[in-house]
Amino acid sequence: MIHTPDAPKILPQGDAALVVEFGDAIDRAVSERVTALATAVAAARIPGVREAVPTFRSLLIHYDPLALDFDDLAARARALAATANVARRQARLVHMPVCYDEDLGPDLADVAAHAAMSRGDAARLHASVDYHVYMLGFAPGLPYLGDLPEALRLPRLATPRVRVPARSVGIASALSVIYPLEIPGGWRLIGAVPADLFDLARTPPARLLPGDRVRFHSVERAAFDELRAAFAAGQRGLEIEEAAS
Amino acid sequence: MSAALIVRQGGMHTTLQDRGRFGAQGFGVPVSGALDGEMLWLANALVGNRPDEAALEIIQVGPVLEIAADGARVALAAHGGTWLAGMDGKRALPSWRSVTLRRGESVRVVSTGQGACAYLAVAGGFAVAPVMGSLSTYARGRIGGFEGRCLAAGDRLPLRRAGASEGPDLRLPSPPEPGAGPLRLVPGPQLDRFVDGALDVLCNSVYVVGRAADRMGLRLEGPEIAHRAGHDIVSDGIATGAIQVPGDRRPVLLLADRQTTGGYPKIGAVCTADLPRAGRLRPGDEVRFSAVTVEEVQMLARRRHAELAALAATMVPADGGAFDLDALYGANLVSGAVAGGDND
């Protein structure tokens, strides 16, 4: 396969999926290209394409091998990647309340100690940057957010928890996640959000989507509990700016 | 009460499955769907359903079901000695044919056969609301199917059709062979993350399906597959059939309930034509692989699709004689086959 240094690498994954690779690292610019191509592929409505799944560094296009040839789809993907407009894409800004209390974020003290700062400062540092939603994966509606401030970066727990409560905020390496439902997990838990991130009854079912920006707003426990009750009752939604950036 | 199948025993892992849920992987929702799409197709054909109608996928130990309708036509697709036993003790109903059951009749799916899974289709299908376009069950995430889970005693599965179907019961005069030989894979996309010769090790060895085998995937025991420079990659998308190799160097063959993304390198992916065979593997089964090009396996997929369409067209009334294929069900299958052939 011929490609210029700037062109993505296109590889088969079996005969029903094709991966378009823009890099091999977690990188904001790479991610922007991935989500731009995802948008372009969806808009192109290529017959035989089942769906396209954006990840940190690549787009996996699932297709029906009875309806499409790998070579033809590769050519379409290459052309779309060359013209997909990365710069003009608009990122939504999602305002996400978060509570960093001890019982909601049992690992924050360790993280703070490692960074030689107070628990409060570690929480403020986590909420001090806007995060980019790189992708959803691992579990329905689970967003991977980046990039985490350097001082907070630690590996995953050596022994994952069997049970991570729904809506917990976890961190590991350069990323932060929000667990949409109760599942096992090895990320360090530093807090929780009051909003439900995955609801099958909604379209789309996930509240955060690849390419979104997320800004955390630290709230006290009383406010968190009130917000949680309101979100659970469906009386409140997340504040989202559809702003052109 | 409206027509239903009443579950008297759930079996080991009985779920509603169709061709899978596409369009939600970007939200982290696995595709799911039948482990063996070919048997799903044929079970549906035998009762006059669309090829992609949802049917009951039965894994190893089958359920006991009672008909709470004015009759229901059902068909079981299964390899080896799996059949339907009438609970009145008088009927032993073979697979690869449809049979019309009476109200109040109970049947047990008896499995002594080869293969992990079998499919029981009901004429008209199940009156269950699709989730994101599919009736497939993703039990881990409690998504789709019947209440997002495996069937259990006491469940009442609503049926679309209130009574028996018109026309004769059908049978396949020569059921499909279970198939043999290596599973064919397309190398990559992370072949470069393995040492030289790793693909040869995978393709020249016999692997055995380990005990950790479910709808998500099969852990394979056999020669180790060594990585080059570590076993972590930046997570990327996963296709059904992908063979990922985690840190313990044992390959894992990913099946219908696989996660949408993953952080282990994938040495290859089993082709569409061989996925049904992969889906039927059970713990202790031996498995071999061979590497082929994507162009070759796309040809295989089309050939296999045409073979199945031809096979489904050989159905005859179960009591002998000929019938009008078009009148019974043929339009869907035939159009499916043509759509595939157009692109050769």
Image (tube, rainbow, N blue to C red):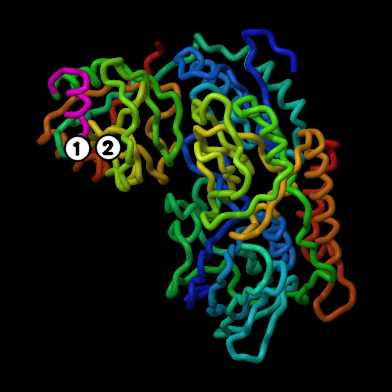
The residue beneath circle 1 is A104
Q: Which residue lies furthest to the left in this view?
A: A222
**Residue lying at 45% horizontally and 56% vertically, measured from the top left:** B148
Residue A168 badge: 2
In the image, farthest residue toward the front: B223
Q: Looking at the image, which is closer to me, B60 or A202?
A: B60
User: Which residue is drawn at the image coordinates 56% and 83% (left, top)?
Assistant: B106
Q: Nearer the viewer, residue B120 or B231?
A: B231
Marks 2 and 1 share the same chain: yes
Marked residue chain, label 1: A
Q: Which amino acid does label 2 sit on?
A: Ser
Q: Mark 2 lies on which chain?
A: A
Q: Is residue A63 visible?
A: no
**What's the magenta region?**
A106-118
What x and y, as percent, mark residue B263?
50, 32
Going by the image, does B305 lie left or right of A189?
right
Disc 2, SS? strand
In the rendered image, residue B127, in percent from the top left (x then y), is placed at 54, 63
Q: Residue at x 49, y 24 (%)?
A: A56
Q: Say whether marks 2 and 1 touch (CB < 8 Å).
A: yes
Up/down of A17 relative to B69, above or below: above
Characterize the local packing of mark 1: few (<14), some (14-19) or many (20 or more) Cα atoms within 10 angstroms.
many
Q: Based on the displayed image, in which of its 4 quarters is residue A222 positioned? A: top left
Q: Where is residue A198 in the image (x, y as percent from the top left)?
A: 37, 40
